[in-house]
Amino acid sequence: MTEEFVRQNLKAYDSGHDWWHIERVRKLALFINEMELLADPFVVEVTALLHDTADSKFAGDNSEQGYLLICDFMDKCEMSEIRDRVLNVIKNVSFSNKSKSANKDDSLLWVIQDADRLDAIGAIGVARAFNYGGFRNNKIYNPEIISPDESLNGTNKTGTSSTISHFYEKLLLLKYRMNTLTAKKLAAERHEFLEVFLKQFYKEWEFGTGIYNPG
Ligand code: ADP
Ligand code: NI
């Protein structure tokens, strides 16, 4: 039922928030919760399924409308009891959300946030980032903003115009923002992959612009 509602409301959106992202977050959240025993699995699943609905249908300033839609759906499906808790999590799950009125002490939020953040790193995270960059028509990399030397020794400046710079603005920070121990363990491997990816990326980039340049 919830799955059908979410599928309906994701239709018109970019693939960074497509159904498969929701499905991965659902699995990750259920796994983290199983390991940590933090919340009722049914509530975890419903929240994971709904977590991007407001965003996806009403991107921009209209997320209030998205929240109303979710409220309405939950009331109709006899989930009024968990409605406010689920909505609080949905409103606060985003990396960039700085809402002050929020209740950040809910273990349900920790689980969903970890699952959502894990899906932004590792191989899937890399794929999603370049997919988003393409969607926005951004450059893959702009050496005038970040040079390989600067980024590899950690003194890089950040800018907003390339997908590689997004790694420094967000992706490489996510490992340190995990709430649960289970997610921290999963994040370690995925974070390592980001570093391997960047290293190889710069190696190939330098080769192309280096002294020896066949072709
Ligand atoms: P969420 O809502 O899950 O916190 P976003 O909506 O910000 O995340 O991003 C969705 C996906 O798009 C993520 O994988 C994220 O890393 C990627 N993304 C967001 N902004 C950028 C950007 N400027 N460049 C490349 N990828 C981005
Ligand atoms: Ni998400």
Image: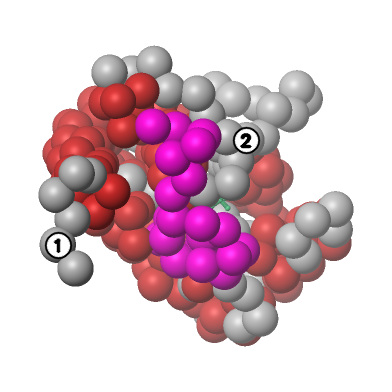
Q: Nearer the viewer, residue 73 or 166?
A: 166
Amino acid, disc 2: Ser
Q: What stretch is highlighted in magenta?
A: 128-147
Q: Which of 107 and 140 is in front in this view?
A: 140
Discs 2/1, front:
1
Q: Which mark is residue 77?
A: none
Magenta stretch contains residue 126: no
Amino acid, disc 1: Pro
- For mark 1, give the secondary structure: loop
Inter-mark Cα distance, 2 to 1:
44 Å
**Residue 54, quarter of the rendered image:** bottom right
Identify the residue under disc 2.
96
What residue is rendered at 85% in x and 58% in y?
Answer: 62
Identify the residue under disc 1.
214
Q: Do the residues labelled 2 and 1 touch (CB within 8 Å)?
A: no
Above/below status of 156 relative to 148 = above
Q: Nearer the viewer, residue 13 or 128?
A: 128
Magenta stretch contains residue 140: yes
What residue is rendered at 59% in x and 25% in y?
Answer: 104
Q: Nearer the viewer, residue 97 or 125?
A: 125
x and y percentages locating residue 210 in the rendered image = 22, 44
